[in-house]
Amino acid sequence: MRIARDPGQSDSCSLRLVVTTSLSHENSLEATARRVSKRLSIPYVRRKNRSLSDVIGSASGAVVVESGRISLHIGESAFWFHPNMAKIRIMQLTRGQRDRMVEVMGLSPGDTVLDCTCGLASDAIVASFAVGESGSVHALEISSLLSEIVSIGLSTHEDPLSELVDAMRRVQVFNADYSDFLRKTPDRQYDVVYFDPMFEKTVETSTGLDIVRIFASPAAPADSDIEEAVRVAKRRVVMKDSSFGSRLQELGFKVLRGKRISYGVIDV
């Protein structure tokens, strides 16, 4: 998922947000909340035992610093980091089952991966498991807010599945626009460069979090971005799309179609 930016706002859209803390542990979390406020350039508002709606006031929502995580509250909806499908996929891989993305990317232990569209980091986590301790996954997220939420989540989220936790801890998230990042990256820096932009057409059975879609931009990689990705990749460039989309062929990918999801591949 790629996120657009709008100078002067908290991220991509006209939402006005504030940073605050949860009611419990308010004093111990204040220093962290102030640091988050400064990094995101979002005003900090002390909680003072008030309800969240009172703290938000005329703003659109709040970034709430809690013990061990950051959550985003807009209206009646709330979002925080969770590995979601990454856990199920890693469980399947540990049982010797296949993962289509891993197969299409051709990942092996020791590989280096650049995920240009981190989003909620589900694909990055699975890639991290596949490349193991000897490999690396760098994930780019243009939204400073989503980057902050996901980075903290990857470093703090606990789970009984140790393989999942280890994979999460190894993912490195960078708040960066892939167009800029790719152009500053040396030739053949990563084994695989990966894109998962928003689909041209929504998969109706998808259960994505609506609160995250508020920040999403429909912008897809341009021809020049793919050219840069090919330069940066040692082995392969992969892009994900819905099976109804047409842009993979338009961008020069070999298309591997599935019932709901297609992958485009360019071998370097």
Image (cartoon, rainbow, N blue to C red):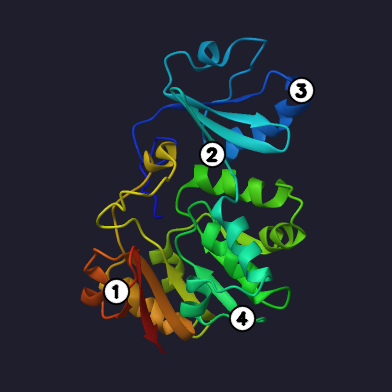
Type of amino acid under label 1: Ser
Q: Find numbered disc 2 in the image and state the secondary structure of the residue it sits on.
A: helix
Disc 3 vs disc 2: which is toward the camera? 3
| Mark 4 or mark 3, earlier in chain | 3
Which residue is denoted by mark 4 in the rendering? Answer: 111
| Mark 2 or mark 1, earlier in chain | 2
| Mark 1 or mark 4, earlier in chain | 4
Distance (Cα) linking label 3 and label 1: 48 Å
Query: Looking at the image, which residue is at 47% across and 82% down?
Result: 233
Residue 79 % position (x, y): 52, 36
Disc 1 vs disc 4: which is toward the camera? 4
Instruction: Specify whether 224 is left or right of 97.
Output: left
Query: Looking at the image, which residue is at 38% across and 42% down?
Result: 213
Which residue is denoted by mark 3 in the rendering? Answer: 25
Type of amino acid under label 2: Leu
Q: Which quarter of the image is occupied by the C terminus?
A: bottom left
